[in-house]
Image (cartoon, rainbow, N blue to C red):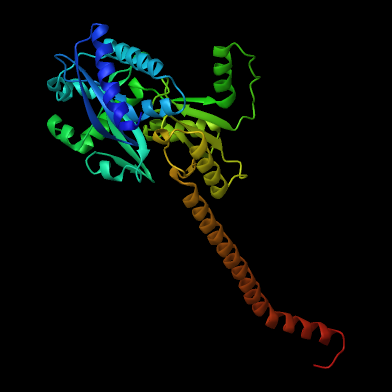
Amino acid sequence: MDYEQFKATFAEDLKSNIQKIGIEADISEHHIEKLNDSYDALSVTPKGSSIGVNANLNEIFHAMERGRDYDEVLSGVTESLKSTLEHMPKLQVSDLTNYEEMKHKLAMEVVSAERNAGMLQNVPHEQMEDIAVVYRLVLDSSKEASSTVLVTNDLMEKFGITHEQLREDAAENAPLIRPAEIKGMVETLNEMQKMQGGPEMEPDPDEILFVAGVPDQNHGAAVIAYPNFFEEAAEKLGGDYFIIPSSIHEVLLVKDTGEMNARDLATMIKEINATEVAPEDVLTDHAYHYDSKEHIFESADKFEERQAEMEAVGLEEDRGSLIDQLNAKKEEAAKEAPEKAAKDAVRKSRGGEAL
């Protein structure tokens, strides 16, 4: 079965399954353009609702190409849709445009500015180096499902607010509904071991690697856009650190011990993104740095360039200081020369020498 045949067959079978479990819904096919991803989807919208759920047809077809059984995949998608629809908030379009209600659901996400350049033209956002900060309404944050709506320029206009107000309200609300968490790598691994019933590691007082994200581990890399996040992380890590974009869901913070450089970090990140991270979850291929003394967030490349410039200025200042000291000694020696000559003459005359 080729992809086109699969789409038609799967749509009919899914519709039949949805009806069998007692859900009345309209099913339609769409191509979804979203931040960091695009795909063919079957949209399942319950009768009387303005909000539906999308099933990713590309991902489902790839699962079958990797050997998954068709009936097994169909059953899994049906159960997933059932669970999501049952826990989905009952909202209409009119509810989504009531800003006084919706602003308490505002959160932040970060994505690659380069990979999403086209869509960002229609989305209010901020720039942090090559990272774009966008805004979402978190309609439901239960463990069973996550329903969110991206704030577009059109939606912002319907809200009747400015970009500045959106940014300020999101900065205030996001840390409340998705608080930032910074944990040492040992603590993170121990939590995983505890869930799996494995042995825990001993705490490391000299730990240099930390994980930053949010409790539900969904789009947690956005914590880097939270007010005061960098300062709080600097306090926890004890100074400067590098920021490694593990994915759109979390970032790694690594103490700057002076042993790492931008080139090696970028090589490592590219390799991990190419082999370990799903394409739709990739943030960027670059490392970043936070200078806790100057309060500067920048790419690791810019940090190294700035450090080199500061060192060059320091050397020039040291050289200038040395030259000033030498000139001062010369001037002092020049002033002392006549006095020394007079003293020598007096000393010689007292010794019976002719003047």
Q: Height in image: 340 above or below 14?
A: below
The quadrant of the picture occupied by the C terminus is bottom right
Q: Residue at x 39, y 34 (%)?
A: 280
Report x, y in % for residue 17: 28, 12
Q: Position of residue 309 (x, y in %)?
A: 51, 58
Looking at the picture, tell me which residue is in the foreground, 24 or 115.
24
Between residues 245 and 184, which one lies in front from this camera angle?
245
Q: Which quadrant would residue 158 be assigned to in this image?
A: top left
Residue appearing at x 27%, y 10% in the figure: 86
Q: Please state the horizontal and vertical placement of residue 226, each as a whole percent of the image.
A: 37, 32
**Residue 186 appears anywhere in the view:** yes
**Residue at 26% of width from left, 26% of height from top?**
8
Residue 296 against residue 180 in the figure, above or below: below
Left/right of residue 211 with respect to residue 171 in the rendered view: right
Q: Quadrant of residue 110?
A: top left
In the picture as drawn, the residue positioned furthest to the bottom comes out as 354
Q: Is residue 161 above or below residue 99?
A: below
What is the number of callouts on the image? 0
Q: Residue drawn at (30%, 11%), measured in percent from left and top? A: 82
Q: Nearer the viewer, residue 93 or 202?
A: 93
Residue 107 visible? The answer is no
- In the rendered image, residue 209, in percent from the top left (x then y), is placed at 57, 32
Q: Nearer the viewer, residue 23 or 119?
A: 23
Among all residues in the image, which is located at the extreme front? 1
